[in-house]
Every structure is written in structure tokens, then in C-alpha cells.
Amino acid sequence: MKIQPAGKLLGTIDLPGDKSISHRAALFSALAAGETRIENFATSADCASTLSCLEQLGVEIRRESSTVHVKGVGKTGFQKSEVALDCGNSGTTMRLLAGILAGQNFDSVLTGDESLSKRPMRRVIEPLSAMNARLEATENHAPLKIFGKNPLTAVFFEPKVASAQVKSCVLLAGLNADGQTSVLEKTPTRDHTERMLRWFGVDVAENETEDGKLIAVSGEAQLTAKDLLVPSDVSSAAFFLVAAACLQDSELVLPNVGLNPTRRAVVEVLKDFGAEIEIFNEREIGNEPIADLRVRGRENLRSRLSENVLRGKIIANLIDEIPILAVFGTQIEGGLEIREASELRVKESDRIKSVVENLRKMNAEVEEFEDGFRVRQSRLRGARVDSFGDHRIAMAFAVAALFADGETEIADAECAAVSFPAFFEILQSVTK
Ligand code: S3P
């Protein structure tokens, strides 16, 4: 993929449905009694992996472009798959499905591509084993063999890492356990699971304690089908917000963007760093807050903060947006430092390394730390960069290319389809 520097971005963009919410919509409607219609289902390859795994497990699914109809089978109505379930590149598919399959009375095997097979699975193996399922993996990596059991043993679990996938895995297993399963969350992570379980009629208890938030579900809970509209993906919006904010005279409108409080930090951070973003028409759909966004491009973005450092609890709220924030950091006075973000090293690629290597190739001044990086305001130069097979790296560097002098070539850019198949087409259509 070759990308030229851009003057400005103009237009209105209909972004794809949120990836995290789409995974959950498919999985939870399969667990429900009755048929659910899901509109604006993500076009991402990851969410297609979730749908095909569910089909392998005997769930009837009908897809008409971005509308998906799922015939629920109930919490234990799945059929054993005779073949391994291929989760592709999708960590969310593997970790959430593991929670569901641990509580079935049959065995399953979950596999993934090269990248997913390198990602840590101990974080779900440990709690599911504590619930009395048996799991086998190769040094805690996929393929993951799950010897299901029903009912599982209800547990109290305190995750060691701030991860919505781990939290969701345990809560889903808890739906098939012999009592109340609770998760103590010290650092808030995206709460789509809690919100959507409630949408499907499950009583999810939430209590603030001195140590964090205690979230609990009962093994007696039942899910009931209920139609859903998926908000547009704020993580996909982030690429266009950064691109337009930094290119003078740009104006983009992004309708129906999901602005869940556990996901919207990227928008607040961009505003704090001087981006001109207007949030309007705030409302709620399917228990999720959404709004329309308008971003205007400015020259010389100036941060309102005393130092441009992001660390601590906010990191979990913008974990997927850090690659594009790194690119943004090259365009703002004072640059940007990200710390306490070592989870980035176990994403679809080692995102600290991917970002640092690519930024250096584009002439940016960057320092790498074990838990993050610091990038200075830099004049970017077109270069040949790598996506490292990681969709968010491919898209972040497509935006960097717009700011650079000369042409940029991104190797293996097609992986953008993992979350946003139409990204390059849309980018081209709004570039003037
Ligand atoms: C996700 C949670 C996050 C995020 C991922 C999607 C989810 O992962 O990075 O893209 O849908 O629950 P972790 O749970 O590993 O932090």
C-alpha cells in the first residue's frame, strides 16, 4: 500500500460497528433463548471469526450485509464441534469463547493464526481451571483444549492484568457455575459485557469496594433475545480524528460513535492535547452511550496539560488507540510519552516495538521503554514501514503517511481488514 501526503480531509464517514460490542452481541445472542437481530454488526474479520465458530457449534446464523440474525440455543444448547474452532487473529473470540465452552458438557479445541498462537492464555486458563474446567495448552499458548464441565464451580477471581477479555471470560463461565461468580476489577476496563448481559435480562451486580469494583453474576441467570443496534467503533474513529485534527482546514463528521465511558478516553485526550473535536447529539442505544463527532483541523496543536504523559488507569481505557496516539505525538508541541502500558507488548504485535521501529523509519525521534515510549514532535519523512501483521499498526501508519514528506509504503497493509476492511477506501474518499 502506497500513501501520499494529504492536504486535508473532508466529508462524513459511516464507521463500521464496534468490534468489541459485535463479538459480544453474537456470543450473547447465541446464549439467549429466541432470535436476535443485530444491526450494524462489525465488518471486521475478527467478528466473522466469532460468527463462524458459533456456526461450528451448531448456532444458526443468517447474515445480510451488516445485519446478523442469530437463533439462540440457550446457555448449554451448543453442539460439540468435531473440528477445531478457528479464532483467526481474534483474542476476544478465543478468550470469551473459552469462558462459554468451559461450562459445556463436551470438549473443544480453539486455534488461531500465528499472532494469536503467540498471545498469553494463562490469564484465562488459571481462572477457568479454578472453576474446575480442565484446559490444555502448549506453554500457555493456543491451541487451547478445553474439557468442559457443567456446572462449573463458582469462584471469586481477582485478575492480575487489567483485561476486559479475562473479566468477560470468567463472567461468561459464571453463567454456567453452581452459584455466584465474582470478579474484582482494580483498574476499570471496557464494560460492554456487563452492559450487554443486562440488555439480555441478566442481573449483573456491581459494587464499589475499597479494592476496586466487584462484578458478579449467578449461574441461574438466563438470557432472553433482544434486538440490538451496534454503535460505530470509537477505536476506528480514532484514526480519522487524529488525521483530520492535524491537517489544517479539514472537517470530518463521524455519526453514531460509541462513547462508552470505559472507551472514550481517546477523545478526551485528543481534546486535552489541542484537537478541535465537538461531541453532539449524545444519546444511548442498547445500553451504550453514543454521539456524533465533528473534528476540525488546526495548525500547531497545543496541549492544555502541563506534561504530555499518559500513564496509570487511563491506559486501559485507550489501550487500542495507543498506536495512533503515538503518531499524533509526532504532531504536537512537547510530543507524547506513554508509560505503564506493557500490555501493548502482547497485542496482535508487540505494539511498543512496532510503533518505535516504524516511527524511527519515518524520521521521528523516539525512545523505547519496557512499558512504553516517548516520541518528540518530529517532521515525518515518507519511508517503507511494516504493519507487523497488525491491523492497528497498518492504519496508524497510513495516517502518519498523510503528515509525511514524500511517499510512504506500508508492507502487508491488508491486515487492516481484521478490524476495518474499508479503511483505505474510506481514507482515500475523504482525502483532498
Ligand atoms: C477487548 C479487550 C482488550 C482490547 C481488545 C478488545 C475486548 O483486550 O485490547 O482489542 O473486546 O474485550 P484485553 O482484554 O486483552 O486488554
Image (cartoon, rainbow, N blue to C red):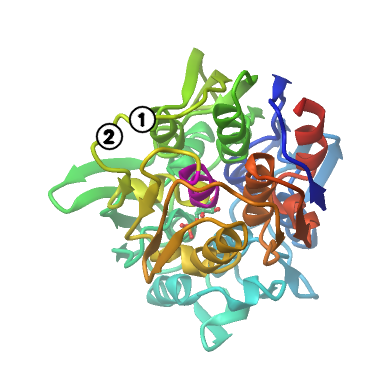
Provide residue 137's location: percent of width, then percent of height.
57, 85
Q: Quadrant of residue 360?
A: bottom right
Q: Visible in this render: residue 93? A: yes
263 in magenta = no
Determine if the C-beta at disc 1 is less than 8 A from ligand 1: no
Q: Residue at x 63, y 30 (%)?
A: 232
Give the residue furthest to the top.
281
The residue under label 2 is 305
The residue under label 1 is 272
323 in magenta = yes
Q: Which residues are magenta?
A: 322-330
Q: Quadrant of residue 40?
A: top right
Amino acid type at mark 2: Leu
Q: Residue at x 55, y 28 (%)?
A: 245
Q: Nearer the viewer, residue 260 or 127?
A: 260
Q: Which mark is residue 126?
A: none
Amino acid type at mark 1: Asp
Q: Residue at x 63, y 22 (%)?
A: 254
Estimate the spatial distance between the alpha carbons at disc 1 and disc 2, rounded to whole Å: 7 Å
Element type where label 1 sits in the image:
helix
Which quarter of the image is occupied by the C terminus? top right
